[in-house]
Amino acid sequence: QVQLVESGGGLVQAGGSLRLSCAVSGRTFRNYALGWFRQAPGKERDIVAAISWSATTTYYADSVKGRFTISRDNAKNTVYLQMNSLKPEDTAVYYCAARQFGGLGLATNDYNYWGQGTQVTVSS
């Protein structure tokens, strides 16, 4: 069974930075494509960023391009989301997800496993 545990969320002022981490259990971490999603109150869960199993391909939502960076450390079974220049509209619960087969996934139903989420709140 694969488990994902996010950490690093919190309260930050607009313009600040946070780094989210997601520790993934399982011996085949390097075979998973990974993604970060977010869900604000009353809204759908949307893709923020995704990274292929080899880390050679990444995807970013237009709203975060140039501000967020996704990366992975296969030796530590961990995926990261560095978030800079945060805005109040980035406030949401952030989830990491793992996709066992295929390339990058951009939709929620592309992913097999999910973390519990971590709250990010950006004050103005």
Image (cartoon, grey):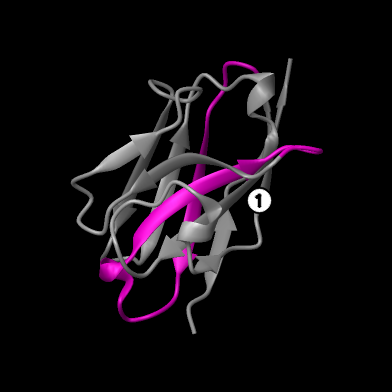
Residue 28 against residue 4 in the figure, above or below: below
Q: Can the viewer see residue 13 in this picture?
A: no
Q: Position of residue 43 (x, y in %)?
A: 74, 37
At a point 33% along the width and 46% down the height, the residue shown is 71
Magenta region: which residues? 14-43
Query: In the image, 84: left or right of 5?
Result: left
Q: Is residue 53 left or right of residue 79?
A: left
Is 79 placed left or right of 52 in the picture?
A: right
* 90 over 1 or under it: above or below: above
Callout 1, which amino acid?
Thr
Q: Quadrant of the C terminus?
A: top right
Neighbours of disc 1 within 10 Å: few (<14), some (14-19), many (20+): many
Pick whichever, 24 or 35, lies toward us.
35
Residue 80, how many percent across, how many down?
Answer: 42, 48
Q: Nearer the viewer, residue 106 or 19?
A: 106
Please name whichever residue, 90 or 13, is drawn nearer the observer in this view of the structure: 90
Q: Is residue 58 visible?
A: yes
Relative vertical location of residue 37 with respect to residue 102 in this rendering, above or below? above
Is 29 placed left or right of 118 in the picture? left
- Magenta run includes residue 33: yes
Q: Residue at x 27, y 69 (%)?
A: 31
Secondary structure category for the residue under label 1: strand
Verify whether residue 38 appears in magenta. Answer: yes
Total numbered labels placed on residues in the image: 1
* Residue to which mark 1 is pinned: 118
Q: Quadrant of residue 102?
A: bottom left
Res 5 → quadrant: bottom right
Q: Residue at x 47, y 62 (%)?
A: 111
Outermost residue toward the right in this view: 42
- Camera-side residue: 67 or 57? 57
Q: In the image, residue 100 lies at what x, y percent?
A: 36, 70
